Amino acid sequence: MTTIAVAETALTLGLLRLADTALVHAQRLSEWCGHAPMLEEDLALANIALDLIGQARALYAYAAEVEGAGRSEDDLAYLRDAPQFRNVLMAELPKGDFAFTILRGFLLAAQARPFWQAASGSRDATLAAIAAKAEKEAAYHLRHTGEWVIRLGDGTAESRRRMLNALAALWPYTGELFETDAADRALIEEGILPDPAALRPHWDATVDRVFAEAGLVRPADVWMQSGGRSGRHTEHLGHLLAVMQHLQRAYPGATW
Amino acid sequence: MVRVLERDRAVAAARAAAARVFDPEIPALSIADLGVLRDVRLGPDDVIEIDITPTYSGCPAMRLIALEVEAAVEAAGLGRPRVNLVLAPAWTTDWITPAGREALRRSGIAPPVPGGGRRALFGADEIVACPRCGATDTEKLSEFGSTACKALWRCRTCGEPFDYFKCH
């Protein structure tokens, strides 16, 4: 069985972190296809997944080009094992109920939108182009999930109970969205990617505004989980990859 | 001089052939009217080069559009072109031509409201006229519709649901 690892420079690592988060989140969203609570949401979640897969494809294609080892976007998506994935842990958690999926989408989009907005001014022309498209898409994801967070948090006793459960489960994974290590800092200094910590006030403002309307309060003093961006994952990622990569692993090189 | 004219004619013919390719998901709309066809030129090796840009990152129609552009240019006797997918500058609904907006309306899809994509994150929705009866008493059913570029709306006057081409 072929398993690959990408030669990691600051840039390829930075690209994989963004691409893997988009792809793994998209895979979780796609699990709702045919199962959402109503038709409009089935379409919405699948549409958001499609946007994220599109972003992931562009980022993988660029990472493969930068690596220069003759690999394709598909190789990067289908032939790496879990320890080679660099997504944030929040993206890989099982899909949970609708409240959990919506809140995860909201927390990620509230970070993604200002991040892509800033990245559209990147000194790297390819990244700037990918970011300019992703930012517009993230705005839709944020509006859609934000409206649902309010509707569920300020809805029935049952919807509120589920939203509170989702909040308690997801909050420990929000810290990782703002982490930076040496590779991140190298990209930030070169003006290639924005500093997520510097963009945190945007995320805080969006979260506070929506939580205020939804009647939700941020959990305090929570231990923050970490590790996905360095390849230390929960047990859930392997199962997700087993489903997502099955065809290429069972029939290497298969094409439609 | 003759050579330059020939090259110009080849580019014009290639542009015309590519412009006749229609969006597979919105058959009323050509890729030229949609603003997806960005550039047609002659490469240094005399091969026609064509730039197309996706409306949304994950638009699944791009590969089919690229194949159809290749086939159209080849069928016009201009050889097999190189079709490039370009991301910058990012596509915007402002690039849909007036003819394209009219074609959308005729096929029951409300064209994008200019400036609609730049509204506040959580605010009032833009005012979208019903493509069937023209009434402006309409409501958004869902931000996401049958394709990545459309939202689902309903007209309160004639009662018909319709697609709205999202402003972007």
Image (spheres, coloured by chain):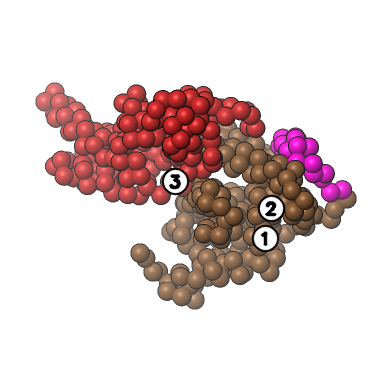
> Which SS class for mark 2?
helix
Q: Are marks 2 and 1 on the same chain?
A: yes
Distance between the Cα atoms at labels 3 and 2?
23 Å
How many tags in the picture?
3
Q: Which residues are magenta?
A: A199-220
Residue B30 is covered by the magenta coloring: no
In front of the other: A164 or B114 = A164
Where does the image place residue A92, in percent across and percent down from the top left?
A: 65, 60
| Type of amino acid under label 2 | Ala
Asked whether disc 2 touches disc 1, contact meaning CB atoms under 8 Å apart, the reply is yes
Chain B appears in which tint?
A: red
Q: Is residue B43 left or right of residue A159?
A: left
In front of the other: A69 or B145 = B145
Where does the image place residue B46, in percent across and percent down from the top left?
A: 21, 39
Q: Confirm whether residue A153 shows in the render.
A: yes
* Mark 1 neighbour class, 10 Å CA radius: few under 14, some 14 to 19, many 20 or more: few
Quarter of image, res A109: top right
Question: Circle 2 sits on which residue?
Answer: A99
Q: Is residue A39 left or right of residue B63?
A: right
Q: Which chain is brown?
A: A
